[in-house]
Image (cartoon, rainbow, N blue to C red):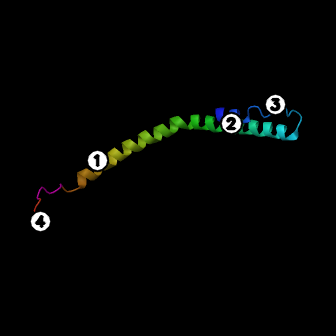
């Protein structure tokens, strides 16, 4: 947001009344609103995504535990054929 505002800074100086200046201002406002919406959406998704990651990690541990129960033990024999 800061870079966007900085890039548009000074555009209207000495160009008041030109259609281009009004269009650039409208574009700036539009992008500011879009970026705020994205920021808010990301903020709303943070907690559910963290919960999913936690649940996924716990499920993976559980699943690996089940596999180790049915897997034969690794042979200690290091000899060849």
Sequence-wise, which precedes: disc 3 or disc 2? 2
C-alpha span from label 3 to label 1: 67 Å
Q: Secondary structure at mark 4?
A: loop
Q: Secondary structure at mark 1?
A: helix
C-alpha span from label 3 to label 2: 17 Å
Q: Which residues are magenta?
A: 73-77
The residue sitting at 24% across, 51% down in the picture is 69
C-alpha span from label 4 to label 1: 30 Å
Residue 19: x and y in percent read 87, 40
Sequence-wise, which precedes: disc 4 or disc 1? 1
| Quarter location, residue 71 | bottom left
72 over 42 or under it: above or below? below
Residue 54 seen from this side? yes
Q: Nearer the viewer, residue 54 or 13?
A: 13
Quadrant in which the C terminus appears: bottom left
Which one is closest to the eye, mark 2 or mark 1?
Answer: 2
Which one is closest to the eye, mark 3 or mark 1?
Answer: 3
Q: Secondary structure at mark 2?
A: helix
The residue sitting at 37% across, 42% down in the picture is 58
Say which residue label 4 marks: 80
Residue 15 belongs to magenta span: no
Residue 28: x and y in percent read 75, 37
- The answer to whether the residue labelled 3 contacts the one labelled 4, judged by CB atoms less than 8 Å apart, is no
- Label 2 Cα crowd, 10 Å radius (few <14 / some 14-19 / many 20+): few
The residue sitting at 85% across, 34% down in the picture is 15
Say which residue label 2 marks: 4
Say which residue label 1 marks: 65
Which one is closest to the eye, mark 2 or mark 4?
Answer: 2
């Amino acid at each position: 947001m800061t870079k966007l505002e900085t890039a548009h800074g000074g555009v209207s100086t000495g160009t008041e009344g030109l259609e281009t200046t009004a269009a650039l201002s409208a574009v700036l406002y539009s992008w500011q609103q879009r970026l705020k919406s994205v920021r808010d959406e990301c903020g709303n998704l943070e907690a559910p995504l963290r919960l999913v990651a936690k649940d996924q990690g716990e499920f993976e541990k559980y699943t690996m535990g089940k596999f180790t129960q049915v897997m034969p033990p690794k042979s200690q024999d290091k000899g060849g054929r």
